[in-house]
Image (cartoon, helix red, strand yellow):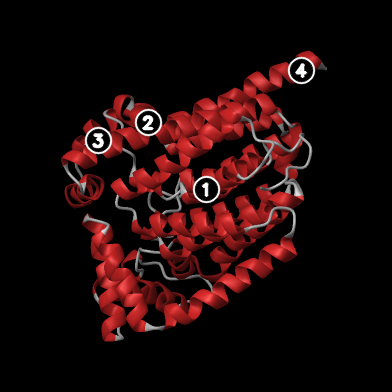
Amino acid sequence: MKSNAKKGSLLALLYCVLIIVGTFSLVHGWFPQLYRHVFITLGIIVVSLVLIPRFFHSKQFLIALVYAIVVYINYKNGDSYTEGKEILDGLVLASCASMAWYFFTKKDIRAQKFLIIASLIILLVDTVGTFTAYMVQPDIVRSLLYEMQETGNHESLIQFYKAGLVEYDVLHGFPVLIPPLIMWLRSENTQLTWRIVSWISLVAIMLVLYAGEATTPFILAIFAIIMSLLIIKGNHKRSMQRLTVSVVLVTPFLLSNTITSSILSGASKLTAGELQKKIETVQKSIDKKRAEGDIDIRYELYSESVDAFVDSPIVGVNDNTKLGGHSALFDRMGAFGVIGIFPWILFVVVFVRYVYRNIPYYAYDFYNIGLFCFIALMVLKNMSYLYTWFSFMVLLPIMLTLNVDKKKLRVK
């Protein structure tokens, strides 16, 4: 039995290797031929077939399979929205769910710690590389992304990836990691080493989001920090009371256009680049009492996808040009209709219920904050990529359960 467990643990380390290859910009820069998410996710599924064959009889896998079939049928029918994701979308869901299933069923602490540490090291390297590039060119991440989208040339991006520049889609997975990091910091029983890791990781997340000019994830990260500090671990009722009182006290100030505008004006002076522009746009929208600039553009993009869904609510439209392209949720609603969006949403619901059954009670509220950040990203951004799902489905729950075998932790 021990030899089988050891063999399983060693094989589970392949999860870590595959995820490192699939999410680390340095690997993308130096070994671009290895950076194929289809092969990465297929590799994870093959490992899962050996380690946890029962997963492939689970509701999670069957729902992911149904969704994958819908996407592939749309692709075969000429749906331009599915190009590049004809099989990848389903593979990402199934591979991440299988990894979470493994850690929850096998209780492989060694592989769990290895995966968490490896992911946080990647975060640190991404932060150093991105902030170094930011000091030379503040809008480096976005400008390279726009250049690649306009010209189709990846060479400039590849060169910066070699220096550790973070990938833009990876930035959107970082906010969900904040709740467990703060949970560790607020626990009296957390070892000093993990406290240091938590502080470094929190600072790294905020720095890389700022340098990467990822406005929505940056705002969600601030939200996650505030909410995580308000939680009373192990007492859901008191946590909700504290959050409710905070909202009641803050809301009147936010409803005051003068106060909100003044706060945003002060915040814009503390920022720069794209983040500063976004804050100024929000301030102008509040002052003029109508959507301005980027907010107006986003509203139009979201509306295009919703209109596409209304036009064809059952099977969706078969034309990518009718979609706004700025929301993972609304775009899938418009592209696939009820037939496609229902299994996609159902998959998340079934997975979340599975997580609730496997994480300790004191971690529920922290998990809810991570869940909110993930849902907000799916609604507001079109960043439904491997790292976004991996951080939400794997890293968030296994970080929350890292101390599960210790005595119940008390909050300071």
Q: Residue 313: x and y, percent?
A: 51, 76
When the figure is inspected, residue 270 is found, relative to residue 19, above or below; the finding is: below
Residue 125 is tagged as 2
**Marks 3,1: beta carbons within 8 A:** no
Residue of label 4: 4
Q: Name the amino acid, label 4.
A: Asn
Question: In the image shown, does 392 or 121 lie closer to the viewer?
Answer: 121
Name the secondary structure under disc 1: helix
State the residue at coordinates (61%, 61%). Answer: 343
Specify which label sits upstream in the sequence, 4 or 2: 4
Specify which label sits upstream in the sequence, 4 or 1: 4
Spatial CA span between label 4 and label 1: 35 Å
Spatial CA span between label 1 and label 2: 18 Å
Specify which label sits upstream in the sequence, 4 or 3: 4
Residue 369 is tagged as none
Q: Name the amino acid, label 3.
A: Thr
Name the secondary structure under disc 2: helix
Left or right of 127 on screen, residue 224: right
Residue of label 1: 178
Q: Name the amino acid, label 1.
A: Ile
Q: Residue 195: x and y, percent?
A: 56, 35
Name the secondary structure under disc 3: helix
Q: Name the amino acid, label 2.
A: Val
